Image: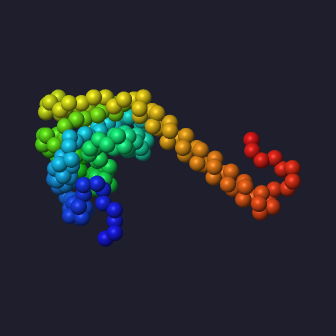
Amino acid sequence: MDQQLPSYWTYFDLEQARGARDFRDLGQIALRVLRRMSENGPVIQVCGPITTGGLGSLSQNLARFQTAVEILKADDYNVFDQMPFQSFMIKLVDAGLSGRDLLEDFYGPIFASGLVQFLFFLPLWETSAGAKWERQRAFLYRLPFADYPNDLLTMAESAKALFQTSFSERGSDVQIQNSITAGRFSAGARVGS
């Protein structure tokens, strides 16, 4: 087993997640992870659109969610990253469990535990059934929260897009240089736009 484990996970957690029969099983793993995390200071959780609302698609919402988590981790915040649970959650939904089960049986015990001390809500949280539920639970359990700074998120997403474009263009330059070196362009050929 040379698989890289998510932060604060054990191989036992991974095996338990693979065999999870419901969201309660996954929630127990999350609580173990959160207990380990809490030994390193206050734990923050990002809340926001994933499966409903947000940017309009699961893949776009997941990308934005992960960017928000990465920004906080880069600033040394102790962030509970829910993404390692995502594939197991999808498996359970595909097996017939509902989004309501996910909220009540996975996230409910997390919010009630007190192990998460602060919540950041992503932009467009109000378009998501799950994020609205999380906001209600924040009030219920008196968890401090704030809206995630949209400017920070937009800046990070722009930087990622710029990096990917720049990298792509550099890759094209390398291909052009290799073609020139290999003699595929004749003298005087126009390169570029």
- Residue sitting at x 34%, y 65%: 3
Q: Position of residue 47 (x, y in %)?
A: 29, 37
- Residue sitting at x 17%, y 48%: 39
Count all numbered tags in the image, as a single digit.
Answer: 0
Is residue 51 among the parts visible in the rendering?
A: no
Give the colouring mode of the picture: rainbow
Looking at the rendered image, the quarter that the N terminus falls into is bottom left
Looking at the rendered image, the quarter that the C terminus falls into is top right
- Residue sitting at x 34%, y 37%: 49
Q: Nearer the viewer, residue 39 or 162?
A: 39
Q: Position of residue 87 (x, y in %)?
A: 32, 55
- Residue sitting at x 20%, y 30%: 144
Is residue 172 among the parts visible in the rendering?
A: yes
Describe residue 103's horizontal placement relative to residue 66 as left or right: left
In the figure, 12 relative to 36: above or below?
A: below
Quadrant location of residue 136?
A: top left
Furthest residue in direction right, as rendered = 187
Describe residue 12's horizontal placement relative to residue 90 as left or right: left
Q: Position of residue 101 (x, y in %)?
A: 20, 46
Q: Position of residue 178 (x, y in %)?
A: 72, 59
Describe residue 43's horizontal placement relative to residue 4 as left or right: left
Q: Nearer the viewer, residue 38 or 191?
A: 38
